[in-house]
Amino acid sequence: MDHDLKGYQRAELFRQAHHLAPVVTVGKEGTSEALMEHLDRELMNHELIKIKFTDFKANRHGMAAQMAARSGAYLVGVIGHIAILYRMHPEPGKRRVHYPEK
């Protein structure tokens, strides 16, 4: 990504993600290609998603950062066994998630 999220932007994305259910689950297969393809589809469809770690719980922070980097998304944060990722839709007309710029 070309810039990092500011604290107030991250807080707004956390707020918007609060009611979301996890749409990606990291299980025994880890970050397989199939999981990364699923992650990419979900980011394209929703922009802001939650990822649940059922396995690899001890490595969830590092894995979440790796998944964000591989998918071109921001790692908004990790709370418990849930990671929150955000990637803006490439088409402005299809963007669903908005956060303050300044």
Image: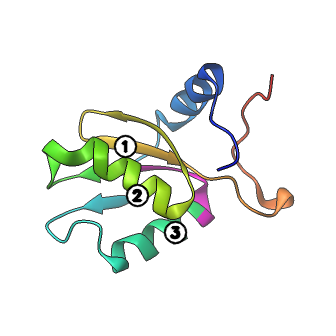
Can you give x and y, in whole percent of width and height, for residue 51 in the image?
36, 52
Earlier-in-chain disc, 2 versus 3: 3
The residue carrying mark 3 is 40
Q: Residue at x 76, y 54 (%)?
A: 95
Q: Residue furthest right?
A: 93
Can you give x and y, in whole percent of width and height, for residue 46 in the image?
59, 57
Q: Residue at x 53, y 71 (%)?
A: 41
For residue 28: magenta? no
Q: Residue at x 52, y 68 (%)?
A: 40
Residue 37 image-quadrant placement: bottom left
Q: Is residue 75 left or right of residue 51?
A: right
Question: In front: 63, or 77?
Answer: 63
- Magenta-tinted stretch: 44-51
Badge 1 density bin: few <14, some 14–19, many ≥20, Cα 10 Å: many
Q: Amino acid at mark 3?
A: Asp
Earlier-in-chain disc, 3 versus 1: 3
The residue carrying mark 1 is 83
Q: State how far apart marks 2 and 3 are (Cα).
A: 10 Å
Q: Amino acid at mark 1?
A: Ala
Can you give x and y, in whole percent of width and height, for residue 11 in the image?
56, 23
The residue carrying mark 2 is 67
Are discs 3 and 1 less than 8 Å apart at CB? no
Q: Is residue 22 visible?
A: no
**Helix, strand or loop for disc 2:** helix
Earlier-in-chain disc, 2 versus 1: 2
**Helix, strand or loop for disc 3:** helix
Q: Is residue 1 left or right of residue 55?
A: right
